Image (cartoon, coloured by chain):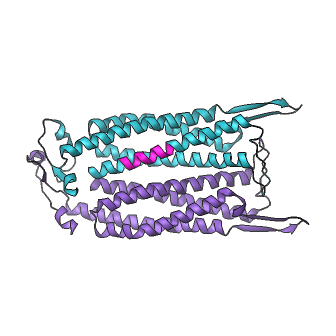
Chain colours: A purple, B cyan
């Protein structure tokens, strides 16, 4: 058990002990209090991951089911809006699905860091993957937000008209998905900060 | 490996006393080899920051100077495209300027971690700020990329026409800015990974 050999407490009365000479002597150094704190941080990590899963999955699901047909149509054309129509929204759906999948797969690793608070290699791996997932989620959310803004407001100088006047429900769904994606982004930032604190305590 | 991280050698002719910081229970701890490696990582951090500054500044400058007037005009209207016309591009400019400013301000902190490889508090601060800057840069780049894609390709179902047929130079400038922004995003990811490694060696 790793935690056994790492939790040697050297109760130093003063800083003078730090001058102990000796090459490659491993003086290990973690008070039980620090271990408890690391365990608490690992549990917080797990709970935050659950929250991120909910946010990312609901973003993907809301985007995937956004679909609206208008009740009138011409001879050639029925007015219908769906996430398929916009490559950005397709990217959003794929990216958030990938992020959700990664989050589910990362849960076992998070549990391992609860059981073994000194397994810093796993934590390092999680930080790397979290950073990549953060980038993916942020880019999906921001790109979709730019398009949603355009759909709401249009742009006069490039003559792109707002379509949310017609497709009200579609726009509401898509906006909700973007908000959920940004929630997962915020949770990811918290996860990375927690992991950095965890690695520092190592 | 693990014991290497923790091995105390205080054989030192000097600055290792700076490593005895914090509460008295924590004896700080690094073999000379690990110190050299940390110094190398701190120097790599500094160099990467310089690269990120160049990328972010060039992204902001390219976007800020993108401006094109077409050589023909009607009685009422001269055809002109500039980043002002799109709120997304304005956001891009502001965000990349902020990121550049943060990067310049972070250089002194990066130098401190070269001089004092055990100053993990500063490193933690840099990780937190880097993560926020990464999110800002990614969202600016992704939002601008979504609009640039639309400007290049248009969207048939929402009846938004491509404008890059007319404004060729403008579109090229803006696309270049987006690419530079994504370069800075990649550098930020590397910076965060380096910092996580650095904190783990702590």
Please state the total of marks drawn on the protein image. 0
Res B26 visible: no
Res A181 visible: yes
Extreme-right residue of the structure: A75
The answer to which image quadrant residue A151 occupies is bottom right
Extreme-left residue of the structure: A21
Is residue B180 located in the magenta-colored stretch of the structure? no
Residue B89 rendering spot, x and y as whole percentages: 64, 41
Quadrant (top left/top right/bottom left/bottom right) for the C terminus of chain A: bottom left
Residue B123 rendering spot, x and y as whole percentages: 34, 45
Residue A111 rendering spot, x and y as whole percentages: 36, 70
- Please tell me which residue is depicted at 69% across the width and 39% down the height of the picture: B171
Closer to us: B1 or A179:
B1
B199 left or right, relative to B173? left
Closer to us: B119 or B21:
B119
Q: Is residue B64 above or below residue B133?
A: above
B1 left or right, relative to B161? left
Q: Is residue A39 above or below residue B163?
A: below
Q: Over which residues does the magenta segment extend?
A: B184-194
Magenta region, main secondary structure: helix
- Please tell me which residue is depicted at 32% across the width and 40% down the height of the picture: B42
Quadrant (top left/top right/bottom left/bottom right) for the N terminus of chain A: bottom left
B161 left or right, relative to A18? right
């Amino acid at each position: 058990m790793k935690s056994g050999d790492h939790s040697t407490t050297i109760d130093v009365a003063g800083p003078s002990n730090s001058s102990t000479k000796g090459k490659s002597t491993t003086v290990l150094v973690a008070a039980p209090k620090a271990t408890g704190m690391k365990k608490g941080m690992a549990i917080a990590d797990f709970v935050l991951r659950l929250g991120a899963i909910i946010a990312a999955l609901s973003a993907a699901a809301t985007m995937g089911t956004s679909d609206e047909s208008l009740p009138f149509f011409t001879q050639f054309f029925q007015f219908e809006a769906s996430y398929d129509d916009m490559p950005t929204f397709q990217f959003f759906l794929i990216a958030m699905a990938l992020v959700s999948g990664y989050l589910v797969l990362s849960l076992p690793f998070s549990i391992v860091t609860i059981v073994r608070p000194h397994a810093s290699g796993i934590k390092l791996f999680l930080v790397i993957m979290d950073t990549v997932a953060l980038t993916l989620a942020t880019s999906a959310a921001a790109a979709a937000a730019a398009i949603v803004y355009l759909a709401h407001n249009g742009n006069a100088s490039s003559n792109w008209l707002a379509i949310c006047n017609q497709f009200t429900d579609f726009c509401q769904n898509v906006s909700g998905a973007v908000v959920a994606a940004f929630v997962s982004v915020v949770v990811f930032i918290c996860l990375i900060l927690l992991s950095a604190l965890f690695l520092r305590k190592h």
